[in-house]
Amino acid sequence: MHLGAIALLVRDYDEAIAYFTDCLGFALVEDAPQGAGKRWVVVAPPGSGETRLLLAKAADPRQLQAVGNQSGGRVFLFLETEDFQASFEAMRAKGVRFCEAPREEAYATVAVFEDLYGNRWDLLQPRR
């Protein structure tokens, strides 16, 4: 078994697709209409064969309130890279907002960034 997708609440499908594909370099895997303005939108990091993000448009006030704060302010998602410095520089050049300078930890080189809604992510290169 594996995690196939993680739902991420977004305000707008198109702005979320633009951010994930343009700023983070993700691929748009699927964008299928579901009727009544709902879409099945899946994005994935380059080379990702299993876990993907389902961009789920917030449908009511409760969901809208959770956009950008799905984890209560903690780091929510962990984006692994094989070349931290190259990924960090490319993302920063595309306007990704990092909350800190890169740091060395026992488990990885890591830096926290926020997506377009404020969800916190770790960009990390694990130590192998």
Image: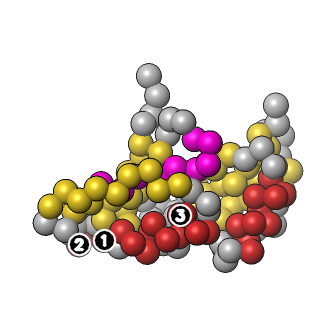
Magenta-colored span: 40-48
Which one is closest to the eye, mark 1 or mark 3?
3
> Is residue 123 positioned above or below 94 on the image?
above
Identify which residue, 107 or 2, lies in the foreground.
Answer: 2
Q: Residue at x 35, y 73 (%)?
A: 12
Mark 2 or 3, nearer chain start: 3
Mark 3 Cα shell of 10 Å, populated few (<14), some (14-19), many (≥20): many
Say which residue label 3 marks. 20
Label annotation for residue 64: 1
Separation (CA) of disc 2 from disc 3:
24 Å
Specify the amino acid type for callout 3. Answer: Phe
| Amino acid type shown at disc 2 | Pro
Query: In the figure, is residue 32 to the left or right of 48?
Result: left
Magenta span has 31?
A: no
Q: Which mark is residue 61?
A: 2
Q: Secondary structure at mark 1?
A: helix
Q: Residue at x 61, y 60 (%)?
A: 25
Q: Quadrant of the N terminus?
A: top left
Mark 1 Cα within 10 Å, few/some/many (few <14, many 20+)? Answer: some
